[in-house]
Amino acid sequence: MKSIVVANWKMNPPTFRAAKKLLEVTKKSAERSGALIVVAPPAIFLRELRQLYRGKRLAYAVQNAHFEGSGAYTGEISLQQAHDAGASYVVIGHAERRAMGESEDDTRKKVAAALARSMTPILCVGEKSRSASGEYFGVVKQQLRAGFTNVPAGKVARVIVAYEPIWAIGAEAAMSPRDMHEMSIFIRKTIVEMHGELGHRVVILYGGSIDEKNAGEMLRLGDVRGLLVGRASADPVRVSALLRSL
Ligand code: PEP
């Protein structure tokens, strides 16, 4: 099965020219890697990038979108607008958006709205910190329960879950594949408890300080279908090294 790499450029690069260069490198490396690359650029670059660079190995996401179809939401974009500009995926509940106030209620509505628009939601979950008592499982369970509450039975397997422990985002090192393996089992179990056997088919990604040195091992041993990559995806040299390493 093809692995998936979500390239979350965050608020980078600074110009459209640099974005074109980054995408050109990403596309070339994607073709060689055999993985599906879902590029999540700043929304302002999306339509033009999509027109310039298409391909079987390349899809597009927005880093966030509103669940309402239209209205008085200054500064927001709707899922319909994102889709119209070329996005088929939407990142929901990224830790940086949650830190800016995105609530469980928002993630619930966004996942359901994305599915209703035939877009693929990438629901991000992950705890701030870990302690030996294992309370972080409860945090992840609550985030999953919120995100999956309004998912119709037939669409459960269309949701992608990106597990991103906040302590590993923008950090020095990623979580170990062994710990990810344990978390993948927990995530599936939680979704199966809510929605039955279909929960086994949910695609799980890992995100947090992935680079060319740890990506392959995480894919082999972490029980994940893919990776959500921040910093290393927004640098032409690093992204090509990362994709080459797969
Ligand atoms: C992210 O933005 O979700 C992320 C995983 O960032 P980084 O790869 O830089 O840790």
Image: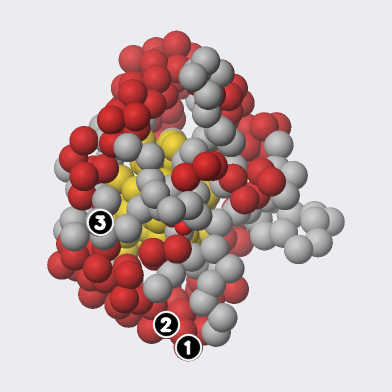
Q: Which mark is residue 20?
A: 2
**What residue is pinned by disc 3?**
213
Residue visible at 39% across and 20% down in the picture? 186
Label 3, label 1: how many angstroms apart (C-alpha)?
A: 28 Å
Residue visible at 43% across and 53% down in the picture? 172
Binning the other alpha carbons within 10 Å of mark 2 as few (below 14), some (14 to 19) or many (20 upward) gives some
Asked whether 211 or 198 is in front, the reply is 211
Label 1, label 2: how many angstroms apart (C-alpha)?
A: 5 Å
Q: Are marks 3 and 1 in contact (CB under 8 Å)?
A: no
From what the image shows, is residue 197 above or below residue 35?
above
Tell me the SS state at disc 2.
Answer: helix
Instruction: Name the image quarter holding residue 25.
Output: bottom left
Residue visible at 69% across and 46% down in the picture? 99
Question: Considering only order in the chain, which callout, 2 or 3, is on the residue closer to the N terminus?
Answer: 2
Label 3, label 2: how many angstroms apart (C-alpha)?
A: 26 Å
Residue 238 visible somewhere in the drawing: yes
Total numbered labels placed on residues in the image: 3
The residue under label 2 is which amino acid type?
Lys
Left or right, 136 with reference to 5:
right
Query: Quadrant of the image for the C terminus?
Result: bottom left
Q: Which mark is residue 17?
A: 1
Q: Are marks 1 and 2 in contact (CB under 8 Å)?
A: yes
